[in-house]
Image (spheres, rainbow, N blue to C red):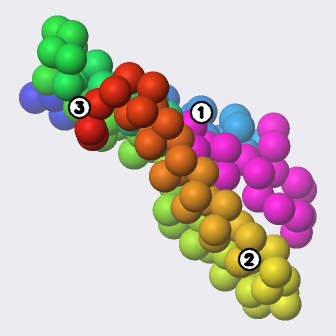
Amino acid sequence: MLNLLLIFIGGGLGSLARFGISKWLNPPVGGFPWGTLAANTLACLVLGLVAVLISQKSGISKELQAMILIGFCGGFSTFSTFSMETLRMIQNGQWLMATAYVFLSLLSCLFILAAVAKMLNIKP
C-alpha cells in the first residue's frame, strides 16, 4: 500500500513539474513544443541517474525507486502529449517541424541516457 501511495505522490509531482515546464517553455499557439521536449529529455536524465544509483547498490529503497522511476518519471514525461503535438503539426502542414520534433525527441532522450551510462561507465 505504501508503494502505491508513493507512486501516486511521485506521479503528481512529475505531472506538476511537466505542467510548469510546459507553461514556461511552450509557445502559446503553434510553435515548437520546447517544454514537452525538455520534460521528456529531463525525465530520461532522472531515469538514467536513478538507474545508475540502483546499479551501484546505493541503498535506495524499492519504494523510493518506484516513486521516482514509475511515479515521477511517468508523470513528468509524456508520450501522449508528444504524439498529439506531432499530429497537430502534421495536420497544420508543418511536416519539417514535425519531423524535426520526432527526431530531436528520440535522439535527445537516447543521447542523455547513453551519456549518463558512459560518464559513469555502466550498462543500463
Q: Mark 2: which secondary structure?
A: helix
CA distance for labels 3 and 2: 33 Å
Q: Residue 6 versus residue 117: which sits nearer the camera?
A: 117
**In the rendered structure, which segment of residues is drawn in magenta?**
24-43
Q: Which mark is residue 17?
A: 1
Q: Is residue 20 visible?
A: yes
Q: Quadrant of the N terminus?
A: top left
> Which residue type carries mark 3?
Ala
Q: Residue 107 versus residue 8: which sits nearer the camera?
A: 107
Query: In the picture, residue 56 is in which quadrant?
Result: top left
Q: Which mark is residue 32?
A: none
Spot the residue most to the left.
Answer: 1
Residue at image point 63% right, 70% down: 102
Q: Position of residue 115 (x, y in %)?
A: 49, 36
The mark closer to the camera, 3 or 2, is 2
Q: Position of residue 120 (x, y in %)?
A: 38, 23
> Which residue type carries mark 1?
Ala
- 37 left or right, relative to 31: left
Q: Which mark is residue 98?
A: 2
Can you say whether 47 is above or below 78 in the image? above
CA distance for labels 1 and 2: 24 Å
CA distance for labels 1 and 3: 18 Å
Sequence order check: which comes first, mark 1 or mark 3?
1
**Residue at which label 3 appears:** 66
Residue at image point 16% right, 28% down: 3
- 21 left or right, relative to 18: right
